[in-house]
Image (cartoon, rainbow, N blue to C red):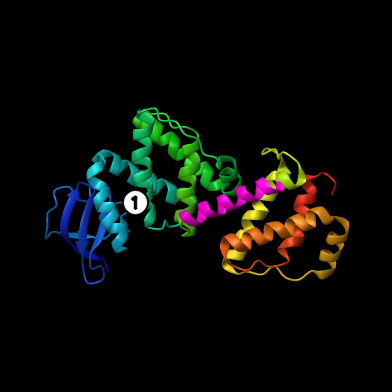
Amino acid sequence: MKQILTIQKVLNNNVVIASNDTYKEAVLIGNGLGFNRKKGDSVPFDAADKTFLLQDEKEMEQYVNLLPYIEEKLIAFIHELLLFIEEKMGKELNEHIHVALTDHIAFAINRAKKEIQFSNPFLFEIESLYPKEYLVAKEVVQKVEERTGVSFPEGEIGFIALHVHSAVTDKSLRDINRYHSLISKMVGIIQDSLDIQLKKENIDYHRLIQHLHRAIDRADKGDPLGDENKLAAMLKSEYPVCYNLAWKLIKIMQNQLNKPVDEAEVMYLTIHLQRLTHKF
């Protein structure tokens, strides 16, 4: 049975506020959805090729407040981009990306037009940790540049990749950025402690940040790795410097996350650290 909603307000040609018994009040977003429609008109939920629904009250309010500052053509274009992202990722996007990505792309275009340049310090790490999201974000940037004629700095690919990752994993950007800041801090400590300069293009660096990310994620979710006492004893004996540094990093994780970290993480971190010294 088709879901039919009643329009409460037409915000523009592509966005309406509507309601029914299921959705008390929701923002419906779809190309041409509001065209020639007015308050009181009926609108089927699947009126557009694909209709996005903003059900969360806070997200809805933020989106409605954002609309007056963005050209209507751009809103329709970002809707196309969201469909493209969803198709490429093969997953339904969390509704918060509508506000976050609309806001980000609109202001990124303004920054580009004013030639305001900035760097993304986590660009390599983002590409390494989220390769699929990064490739999709790269295509999104190309589409924006083709449509608007503006050129984005490379760092924008990383920022958009984070929005995509956030939308498909339902993690907040705040938590994702917290992970990256923690990884960056630990990489700095590793370099100082081992007196080495890590090369980002090196496969061992790639493995290290992948492991740090997974270790932080496991700690955050409370997922244990398991117990390997014999291996731990061997690593402690053979590689004391890296073993002790691994413990230091684990304690930093615990303090930053304010959660316990499985002691088994020390072993795998020790192996990664030892690889970096090229003595493993």
Q: Residue at x 87, y 62 (%)?
A: 234
Q: Measured along the vertical axis of the image, is residue 212 above or below residue 110?
A: below
| Residue 41 shown in magenta | no
Q: Secondary structure at mark 1?
A: helix
Q: Nearer the viewer, residue 141 or 272?
A: 272
Where does residue 218 sit, x and y in percent of width and height?
62, 64
Where does residue 211 sit, x and y in percent of width and height?
67, 54
Q: Nearer the viewer, residue 18 or 202?
A: 202
Q: Residue at x 38, y 47 (%)?
A: 101
Q: Is residue 38 visible?
A: yes
Q: Residues within 10 Å of mark 1 (few under 14, many from 20)?
A: some
Secondary structure character of the magenta stretch overall: helix
- Assign the N terminus to one quadrant of the image: bottom left
- The kind of residue tagged 1 is Val
Where does residue 105 sit, x and y in percent of width and height?
37, 41
Q: Measured along the vertical axis of the image, is residue 278 above or below residue 250?
A: above
Whether residue 236 sits left or right of residue 218 in the image: it is right
Q: Measured along the vertical axis of the image, is residue 227 above or below residue 187?
A: below
| Residue 185 shown in magenta | yes
Q: Give the residue at mark 1.
A: 99
Whether residue 161 sits left or right of residue 143 in the image: it is right
In this picture, which residue range is highlighted in magenta? Answer: 174-190
Where does residue 137 sit, x and y in percent of width and height?
48, 42
